[in-house]
């Protein structure tokens, strides 16, 4: 028994392709040749070339005179930088303890000359003591 899923032999493909090509060929010839009944009866006569006038238009424009451009303006801007150093001085020991002076960070304590700040010193705070050993801004 033959396998029904095999491809068709080459001669079987020619059975459809060749008639389709022949049909397309004859339709093409028929469509190209049948442009109308009167096309067979009319004769084409060559016409003599006759001279035709040629019109040429040329437009010219004149640019307006240029005004001299003003010289560029130079602006000089001076920038001054002023540095202000704020220092906090420890308050006089009034006996109230460490609550009189507050340093926001170690840079402020160093600027005031109080670093390192120890437990019990004015301005000591746990936020200044990273390792918790009682000495801040080491």
Image (spheres, helix red, strand yellow):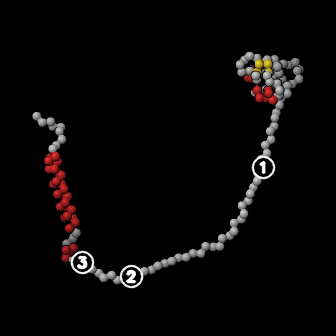
Return the mark for residue 78.
1
| C-alpha span from label 1 to label 2 | 76 Å
> For the residue carrying disc 3, how many other residues have a C-alpha within 10 Å: few (<14), some (14-19), or many (20+)?
few
- Quarter containing the C terminus: top right
74 with respect to 36 (left or right): right
For label 2, the crowd category at 10 Å Cα-Cα, with few meaning under 14, some 14 to 19 and many 20 or more, is few
The residue that label 2 is drawn on is 52
Observer-nearest residue: 111 or 95?
A: 111
Q: Are marks 1 and 2 in contact (CB under 8 Å)?
A: no
Of pointers 2 and 3, the one earlier in the residue sequence: 3
- For image coordinates 76% across by 53% down, the residue present is 76
Q: Residue at x 85, y 25 (%)?
A: 90
Classify 110 as above or below 45: above
Q: Secondary structure at mark 2?
A: loop
Identify residue for label 3: 44
Q: In which quadrant is the N terminus drawn?
A: top left
Indicate the position of residue 133 as horizontal and vertical percent values: 74, 16
State the CA–CA distance, disc 1 to disc 3: 91 Å
Q: Position of residue 88 (x, y in %)?
A: 83, 29
x and y percentages locating residue 84 in the rendered image = 81, 37
Estimate the spatial distance between the alpha carbons at disc 2 and disc 3, rounded to whole Å: 23 Å
Circles 1 and 3: CB distance less than 8 Å?
no
Q: Residue 38, relative to residue 130: is it above or below? A: below
Viewed as shown, does residue 31 lie left or right of 67?
left
Quadrant housing residue 117: top right
Q: For residue 127, which quarter of the picture?
A: top right
Identified at 74% across, 57% down, the residue is 74
Residue 81: x, y in percent?
78, 43
């Amino acid at each position: 028994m033959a396998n029904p899923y095999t491809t068709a032999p080459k001669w079987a493909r020619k059975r459809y392709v060749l008639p389709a090509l022949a049909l397309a060929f004859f339709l093409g010839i028929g469509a190209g040749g049948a442009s109308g009944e009167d096309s067979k009866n009319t004769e084409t006569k060559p016409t003599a070339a006759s001279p035709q006038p040629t019109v040429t238009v040329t437009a010219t424009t004149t640019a307006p005179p240029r005004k001299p451009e003003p010289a560029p303006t130079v602006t000089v801007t001076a920038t001054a930088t002023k540095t202000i150093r704020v220092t906090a001085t420890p308050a006089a020991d009034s006996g109230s303890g460490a609550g009189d002076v507050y340093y926001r960070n170690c840079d402020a304590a160093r600027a005031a000359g109080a670093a390192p700040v120890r437990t019990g010193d004015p301005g000591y705070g746990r936020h200044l003591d990273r390792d918790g050993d009682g000495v801040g801004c080491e």
